[in-house]
Every structure is written in C-alpha cells, then in structure tokens.
Image (spheres, rainbow, N blue to C red):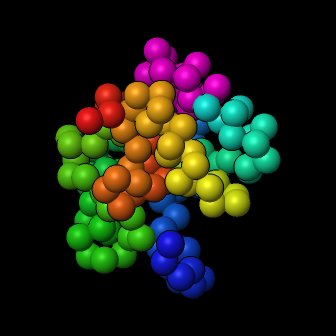
Amino acid sequence: MRACSPAGLAAGRRSDVATIRTLDVRVQPIVQAFIKMLSEAGIKVTVTSTLRDPAKQAKLYADYLAGRSRFPAAPPGKSTHGSGLAFDLKLDPPAYDEAGAIWEQAGFTWGGRFRDPIHFDFRPRS
Ligand SMILES: [Zn+2]
C-alpha cells in the first residue's frame, strides 16, 4: 500500500456513497451477500461507485491521465461500471487482499490484479 496523505485520500475519493440498486439486477444479490460476509468479518464497508454514465467515466479517465487519481480508470465505453457490472468498495480496515481473494474464489475479476484494489468486477476471472 502507498502511504496515505490527506491530499492523496482526497484525490482517491471517486464519489461519496453509491447504491448497489444501480447495478445490473442479476448481480445485486451477489453484491449484497459479499458485503454481508465482509461486514460479519468486522470490516466496515462503503460502496463508493457502482453504475457510471459516460460523462462521469470521461471525467474519471481525464483525472487518471492527469495524475489526479490514486486509482486507474478506463476510457468511457471500456469500463464495466458503464454496464452496471462492477463496483468499488472502501474497506476499513483496508482488507483489500482478503476481499479480493474471496471475490476471485467466487470466479470473478478483482482490480487488485491491475493496481485497482477497490474495484470488484463481474467479468469471469481470467
Ligand atoms: Zn471500479
């Protein structure tokens, strides 16, 4: 993990709190069960990003290219956030490796494999 400065934390904050109700209806029960599992393990879970419109994705991508974001962002049209098939979590304590391992065990793609540990994606694990 990189050292956290107040400026870095502000830059890394993608949005406030998002609702999983904007995700594809087929995946919502899986997300709910995943969050429940993490919560029961004593982790405070905040959903920070779910479905994004193209304008939001374009802004995140521009911020990323300009070095204003702590985490990578895909160009508009290339992110699974655009189809409601990905979500970002803030975990306290930051048990991203453990959460990623559970997510991968379920057969899905975890962003920790591409420097985006907050990102949980419904693409099949490659
Ligand atoms: Zn994401």
Which residue is drawn at the image coordinates 26% and 35% (left, top)? 126
Q: Which sits in the foreground, 86 or 36?
A: 36
Q: Quadrant of residue 84?
A: top left
Which residue is drawn at the image coordinates 42% and 70% (left, top)? 70
| Residue 120: image location, x then y, percent | 45, 41
Is the residue 61 above or below the residue 8 in the image?
above
Is the residue 82 above or below the residue 61 in the image?
above
In the image, the segment drawn in magenta is 20-33
Which residue is drawn at the image coordinates 52% and 64% (left, top)? 13
| Residue 90: image location, x then y, percent | 60, 54
Q: Which sits in the foreground, 98 or 53?
A: 98
Q: In this view of the protein, can residue 48 be seen by the observer? A: no
| Residue 111: image location, x then y, percent | 38, 50
- Count numbered badges in the picture: 0
Q: Residue furthest top?
A: 26
Which residue is drawn at the image coordinates 54% and 37% (left, top)? 102
| Residue 11: image location, x then y, percent | 47, 73
Majority secondary structure of the magenta segment? helix
Q: Which sits in the foreground, 41 or 80?
A: 41
Q: Is residue 32 magenta?
A: yes
Q: Which sits in the foreground, 58 or 122?
A: 122
Q: In this view of the protein, can residue 117 be seen by the observer? A: yes
Q: Is residue 67 left or right of residue 47?
A: left
